Image (spheres, grey):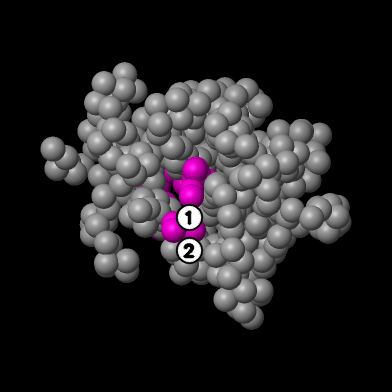
Amino acid sequence: MLFNTYEPWKFAFAQETSNLEDIKNLNFHNLSKSKQWGIIGVPFDSTCSYHNGSRYAPLVIREASYGFERFNTNFQKNLSTIFYDFGDSNIINGNCKKTCEIVEENVTDLLTNNIYPLIIGGEHSLTLGSIKALTKYYNISEITVIHIDAHRDIIESYQNEKYSHATILRRIHELNPKEIIQIGIRSASKEENDYVKNQKNIKTFTPTDLQTDFNKLINYLKSIKGPIYLTIDMDGLDPSIAPSVGNPTPNGLKSQDISEVMKIISKKEIIGFDLMEVATNKLGDITAVLAAKFILDFLTLLP
Ligand SMILES: [Mn+2]
């Protein structure tokens, strides 16, 4: 029985057992047709180019998760999704590529046990490990990546590094997913914009696009077929509501925009979710509180 005792190193409402061996024996997936999810924190921020501190985010976001109820008033729904908190991944400071490989191994372990990844970053580069693990179970050419961010993160290399928070969507695009939908974009290099223009499978929605015709985004998301991976860089939001991020960028999204996206895609086949780039070591930080709420909303909305 979970009493939601305050255990700030575990996400609120997580199942008590988070030992993979125990979970295999429990055989939950025979009891429930719904997907089970596994939280992994990845405290890595080595390639960060501006405000560092996202290495502390998994801890601060978990602590913030205790400020909310199991019942979600917005959605009139209880959180009933089965999910575990497996703690934080090992990382190798200063080595983005190897850390992504560790994330890939961890996520593969979860998927082997029929548990889907929910990653708390850490910097955005770690998304690559999670998606690469999923490609062992899903055909990448059928996966749509929904990418909420102020930045495209799609440059070939950044500061001569191929593996960086600024290049990660390029590495993902090279895997050849069905489509990448970038939402909230308002900062990109000319090279990045030129690259995107020449690709058939990258769609962009800027904050201005959303203000002009939000339904266009909704209808686009409703038309998605096949599995979806959702990756959120918290700097996609406006810095007035999410200031503690690696690269704050003015004129961003509202938190309701993200809730609407989640509402639509929760009716579809979601196979992975990550929430990245909260950069704070302060308990009760408002960006971390919002991040915790997004994770709870996500888990509540799942069927
Ligand atoms: Mn960003």
- Which image quarter: residue 39? top left
Checking the image for residue 268, the label placed there is 1
Q: Quadrant of residue 28?
A: top left
Q: Is residue 255 magenta?
A: no
The quarter of the picture where residue 289 lies is bottom left
Please tell me the numbered disc located at residue 264. 2
Using residue 93 as the reference point, say whether residue 161 is left or right of it: right
Question: Residue flagged by tag 1: what amino acid is it?
Answer: Lys
Q: Are marks 2 and 1 in contact (CB under 8 Å)?
A: yes
Is the residue marked by circle 1 packed among few (<14), some (14-19), or many (20+) residues within 10 Å?
A: some
Q: Residue at x 73, y 55 (%)?
A: 202
Task: Please name the residue shown 32% across and 68% down the image.
Answer: 74
Q: Which residues are magenta?
A: 264-288
Labels 2, 1: front one: 1
In magenta stretch: residue 284: yes
**Residue lying at 25% horizontally and 29% vertically, measured from the top left:** 17
Q: Secondary structure at mark 2?
A: helix
Q: Residue furthest bottom?
A: 212
- Disc 2/disc 1 C-alpha distance (Å): 8 Å
Q: Residues within 10 Å of mark 2 (few under 14, many from 20)?
A: some
Q: Position of residue 47 (x, y in %)?
A: 66, 36
- The front one of 132 and 49 is 132
| Residue found 32% across the figure and 42% down from its top | 33
Name the amino acid, label 2: Ile
When the figure is inspected, residue 220 is found, relative to residue 170, above or below; the finding is below
